[in-house]
Image (cartoon, rainbow, N blue to C red):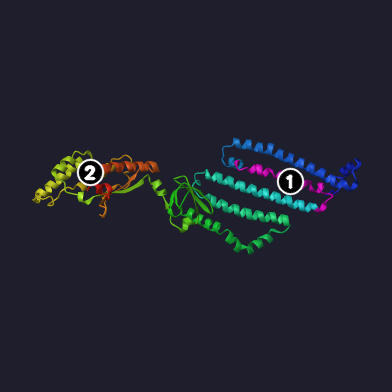
Amino acid sequence: MNTKSMEWLTDWLIGLGVEETSTMYLKLLILLFILFILSYVTNLIVKKILIRSIRLVIKKTKTVWDDALVENKVFITLSHIAPAIVIYLTTPYIFEDFSGAIPYIFRLVNAYISAVLIIVIINILNALKYYFDNTKLFKDNPLDSYFQLVKIAIYIIGGIIILSFLLNKSPLYFFSALGAMTVVLLLIFKDTIMGFVASIQLSANDMIQIGDWVSMPKYGADGDVIEMNLTTIKVQNWDKTITTIPTYAFISESFKNWRGMSESGGRRIKRSLNIKISSIKFCTLEMLERFKKFQLIKDYIEEKSNKIEEYNKENKIDKTYLINGRHLTNIGIFRVYAEAYVKNNPDINLNMTCMIRQLLPTEKGLPIEIYTFSNRQEWVTYEGIMSDMFDHLIAAVPEFELEVFQNPTGTDFRRL
């Protein structure tokens, strides 16, 4: 290295009348100013010419990954190395009169370049994540957890490398110290480690994906999963609030995932009408004649009445009392009517279970349960379908001389 490469500048300053003792410091200031201008121009050239050329090339390509690199500022960040290289190459000439400072400046420059490279690697990871998020194969997978873990490892390794440059020690020195701090690190990154293990289990068992509708009453969560990372899973509730739940909670505690319902093509309707037991009775001929006017069950009543009539004749049943032999009941006919009405509803998925059944009688009457599936899963539409269905059935109950059970109210007592 030529340690006297800038003697011409010294001679020039002395020629201007600068004292020899001050020449060394003034020369350093001038060279630092020139270095600043040179670094700025280098950075400008790289950004304006090289980066712009790269962007123009990328815009002409049809691939997505290179666009992701531009969006995440990979090339812009990488351009910051250019001024550092200029400083590294010119330091021996600028600080030739202060040779003791050269090793420290090299350390700072190396640490700076390492920091820039770390940021570049992080930006590349962000670009990869962006690319995978827009790829059908990985779109709904919880990739955030894995990328966050890689980022943590990069930050730790990068931090050690930067410290090794600044303190002029081997990276092995810091890695050995890191090993001694394992217990402390386990405590610091406890949630991260537990979240990572939970993320692997959730992903391997396909328990939850971004976009799934999940319910977790303990945390007040009921909505769509919008984000998954190492430590938390964010759920946007139906009222647009956001609930943040620890990732490992989805392994250690129970939750409901509605994905199966969404993928099945139907959403379950399971609701009962409680019929007042005292209103249940056998059908008289007059009642049957009136029920035959209901289009949905006209054929059923005629067919069933003929079969019952034949049975009673063959067995010589005494018809004086309706309890003898076989007779239709108003609750049975209502159940058939409800089934016919549900099955004729265009919003019901008939490829799935559809039945109207009696449940165990209780102190609140005889429950008639409608168990079926709508062909629409959207919450608002689903609620509308179910409400319209029960509006009709509740209004139809009195037509069969039945009553819906209801606890007595103040109005009932005033009537008495």
Measured Cα–Cα span from mark 1 to mark 2: 90 Å
Q: Is residue 391 left or right of residue 25?
A: left
Left or right: 281, with 363 as reference point: left
Q: Residue at x 56, y 40 (%)?
A: 64
Residue, disc 2: 398
Helix, strand or loop for disc 2: helix
Q: Identify residue type, mark 1.
A: Ile
* Residue 213 in the figure: left or right of residue 286: right
Picture quarter containing residue 294? top left
Verify whether residue 87 appears in magenta: yes
Closest to the observer: 47 or 276? 276
Residue 345 shows in this picture: yes
Front residue of this view, candidates 30 and 351: 30
**Residue that carries the numbered disc 1 in the rendered image:** 85
**Label 1 neighbour load within 10 Å: few <14, some 14-19, many 20+:** some
Write the start and end of the magenta stretch as one range: 71-100
On whether residue 249 falls in the magenta region, the answer is: no
Q: Nearer the viewer, mark 1 or mark 2?
A: 2
x and y percentages locating residue 338 in the rendered image:
26, 44
Residue 48 location, x and y as percent? 69, 37
Of mark 1 and mark 2, the one earlier in the sequence is: 1
Mark 2 belongs to which amino acid? Answer: Pro
Label of residue 261 in the image: none
